[in-house]
Image (spheres, rainbow, N blue to C red):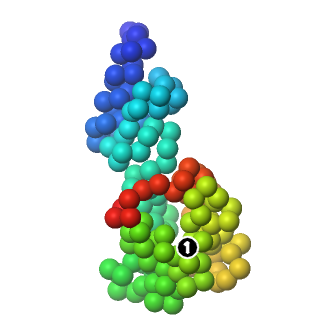
């Protein structure tokens, strides 16, 4: 069975717009082409353009993981005030419970925690890689640490402008 390009674009648009658990933009974009979806103004359920990393869809789930999460460690245990032990928030001043508080940074990073368009200079990337001038590599509970693919995903989000609403 073959579909016309316009039919594929329509199907891809629907897959990106609907919160389907088994099908989404990342699965259908290769069928049509990310550039064509982007040119058509297709966005996914988070409002992110196709081909763009979304804070809510892609980054937030990594940050919200606990050290014992089967998917790997995250930041929640130490940097969310909702947790019983939030030493990273208490000592470092870095609150990751929303994008707005992340952007404020911590005691040593301040607003340099995320520098839109410049992941290499963003303190969060340096902390995740263990190259930041202060403190230890994050998450402090590691190893294991975030995977290189996860760090690259966060780097791509920053390189794309670190977009997202402060409430995310």
Identity of the residue drawn at 40% across and 87% down: 85
| Element at label 1 | helix
> Callout 1: few (<14), some (14-19), or many (20+) C-alpha neighbours within 10 Å?
some
Q: Is residue 157 above or below residue 77?
A: above
Q: Is residue 167 above or below residue 108?
A: above
Q: Can residue 28 be seen in the rendering of this structure?
A: no
User: Which residue in the structure is indicated by mark 1?
Assistant: 111
Q: Position of residue 50 (x, y in %)?
A: 45, 37
Answer with left or right where residue 103 lies relative to residue 149: left
- Using the rendered view, name the quadrant where residue 108 is placed: bottom right
Answer with left or right where residue 71 lies relative to residue 144: left
Identity of the residue drawn at 34% across and 24% down: 11
In the rendered image, which quarter contains the C terminus?
A: bottom left
Q: How many marks?
A: 1
Q: Position of residue 146 (x, y in %)?
A: 57, 64
Identity of the residue drawn at 41% across and 69% down: 100
Answer with left or right where residue 13 lies relative to residue 163: left
- Using the rendered view, name the quadrant where residue 155 is placed: bottom right
Q: Position of residue 15 (x, y in %)?
A: 33, 32
Identity of the residue drawn at 51% across and 90% down: 91
Depth check: 112 or 88 in front? 112
Depth check: 96 or 137 in front? 96
Depth check: 44 or 115 in front? 115
Depth check: 24 or 165 in front? 165
Q: Position of residue 35 (x, y in %)?
A: 52, 29
Q: Can residue 54 be seen in the rendering of this structure?
A: yes
- Using the rendered view, name the quadrant where residue 120 is placed: bottom right
Q: Is residue 14 above or below residue 84?
A: above
In the rendered image, which quarter contains the N terminus?
A: top left
Residue situated furthest bottom in the rendering: 91
């Amino acid at each position: 069975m073959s579909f016309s390009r316009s039919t594929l674009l329509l199907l891809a648009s629907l897959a990106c717009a609907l919160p389907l658990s088994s099908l989404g933009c990342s699965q259908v974009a290769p069928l049509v082409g990310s550039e064509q979806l982007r040119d058509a103004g297709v966005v996914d359920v988070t409002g992110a353009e196709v081909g763009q990393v979304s804070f809510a869809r892609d980054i937030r789930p990594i940050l919200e993981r606990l050290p014992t999460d089967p998917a790997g460690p995250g930041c929640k245990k130490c940097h969310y005030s909702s947790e019983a032990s939030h030493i990273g928030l208490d000592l470092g001043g870095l609150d990751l419970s929303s994008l707005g508080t992340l952007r404020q940074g911590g005691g040593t990073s301040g607003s340099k925690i995320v520098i839109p368009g410049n992941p290499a200079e963003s303190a969060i990337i340096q902390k995740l890689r263990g190259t930041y001038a202060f403190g230890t590599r994050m998450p402090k509970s590691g190893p294991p640490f975030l995977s290189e693919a996860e760090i690259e995903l966060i780097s791509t989000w920053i390189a794309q402008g670190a977009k997202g609403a402060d409430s995310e």
